[in-house]
Amino acid sequence: MNAREAAFKVVHEVLFKKGYSNIALDEMLNRDFDSRDAGFITEIVLGTLRNKMLLENIISIHSKIKIKKISPSVMSVLLIGAYQIIFMDRTPNSAACNESVKLAAKFSGGRARGFANAVLRAITRDNRSLEEYYRHGAIREGEYNCNKYSICPSAYYKLVKQFGESATVKILENINQPARPCIRFNDDENVLKHKVILKDNEIPFEKGKIAASAFYPDLNGPVSELDIYKKGIISLQDEGAQAMGLFASPQPGSEVLDACASPGGKTAHMAALMNGNGMITACDIHTQRVTNMKNNLSRIRFRNFKFMEKDMSVNHKDFKDKFDTVLVDVPCSGIGTAQRRPEIKLFYKEDPSLYKLQGAILKSCSEYVKPGGHIIYGTCTLFNEENREIVDMYLSSSDEFTLEDEKTILPDGRTGGFYMAKLARQS
């Protein structure tokens, strides 16, 4: 399988089989592609998903068949082909067309070959600017921005209602930038020592601005190829996610519950913050995710954690009044992480059942906090319905907890968007 076919398969999986781009891409790259091909595949996949609505608009201009009537496999081929033509200057248009046409024939037959060839050749001859493509078919400013940033209207107008149009555009500009890898050291919070390690390994870097533990290495290949990654010295983790671990501030020697812990990044971070002293109970509802956490955390130095398979939306009497700190990073719409998973902004739908689940998890987990302890409610979304409104709804029904601190992180081009609130239980 060559790199373009690999990219095609991932895009098809995400757009038409509702796969997750991070999982589908990781599984594909694990098939032993070299670093150059891996980078090529990653750029095509994430770039195509990041610009999907714009690319569809471009394809619709040159297709005699309506977009909705083009088969999923052919549409996937056209999307990755159009992305290469429009955005990848170092890729010859002839190669983008020829290889895409081969994929169309392989996965959709001979008729698809001619159709794909006609559409993609027409795109290469089209001298319109990106600005003209953004404007095509957009009557209102909102439609223009949805085209430009490839975000579904329901998510766009919800952001506008909450932040205003100019702030929303800034958020979308940041979300639509290619994500940079962010790392965290697995041992402690000694930033000076970590800078020395990176310099000794000849790894250029930029320091994070939100989390003291965050570093952005300047690499030619994936982080997983670094020796310090293979040895478990560093892990990949978004800076905003690191900020949540710091916000929780678990103390050495304490009992901590990471209630919705998969894939385990915050568990590992809190273990480092506790310097390996105390105990973290990391839970998830799915057996496979618990297994994945065990595997993910087997790389790191500290071992002050244990894993359990539990549904945190229901009450567990064995946990009552047991923990000094409870971190509840609830399932959410995830719009804050759309920079790393671009399909999120394409598929967003209002889901009141999600709000109900978030409230149920917060209520159940609050019962596990010791008197004088804290529960941290967190999400990776920007919508108030999943953030402050869930917290306020809970506080209105509880006379034991008060809001001690709150933090919202907006996407800035490097970190994603996160919300966190710290609730204190009376002693």
Image: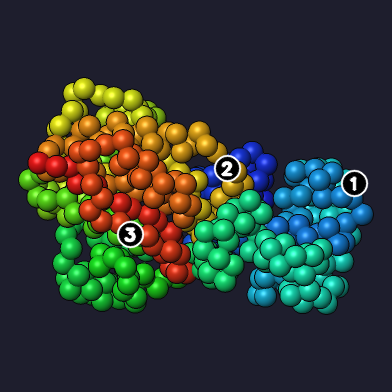
Please name the amino acid that badge 1 sits on. Answer: Arg
The coloring applied to the image is rainbow
Q: Earlier in the sequence, mark 3 or mark 1?
A: 1
Is 346 left or right of 390, judged from the image as shown? right
Q: Cα distance, mark 3 to mark 1?
A: 55 Å
Q: Earlier in the sequence, mark 3 or mark 2?
A: 2
Please name the amino acid that badge 3 sits on. Answer: Lys
Residue nearest the observer in this picture, 360 or 56 = 360
Q: Which mark is residue 424?
A: none
Q: Which mark is residue 350?
A: 2
Q: Which residue is mark 3?
A: 407
Closest to the camera, between mark 3 and mark 1, is: 3
Please name the amino acid that badge 2 sits on. Answer: Glu
Closest to the camera, between mark 1 and mark 2, is: 2
Label 2 environment density (alpha carbons within 10 Å; few <14, some 14–19, many ≥20): few
Residue nearest the observer in this picture, 136 or 101 = 136
Name which residue lies at 56% across and 50% down: 344
Query: In this rendering, is residue 390 above or below 48?
Result: above
* Image coordinates for residue 214, horizontal then vertical, percent: 30, 66
In this view, which residue lies farthest toward the right?
Answer: 64
Q: Quadrant of the C terminus?
A: top left
Q: Cα distance, mark 1 to mark 2?
A: 39 Å
Is 315 left or right of 150, judged from the image as shown? left
* Image coordinates for residue 148, horizontal then vertical, percent: 68, 66
Q: Cα distance, mark 3 to mark 2?
A: 23 Å
Q: Which residue is mark 1?
A: 111
Q: Are marks 3 and 1 in contact (CB under 8 Å)?
A: no
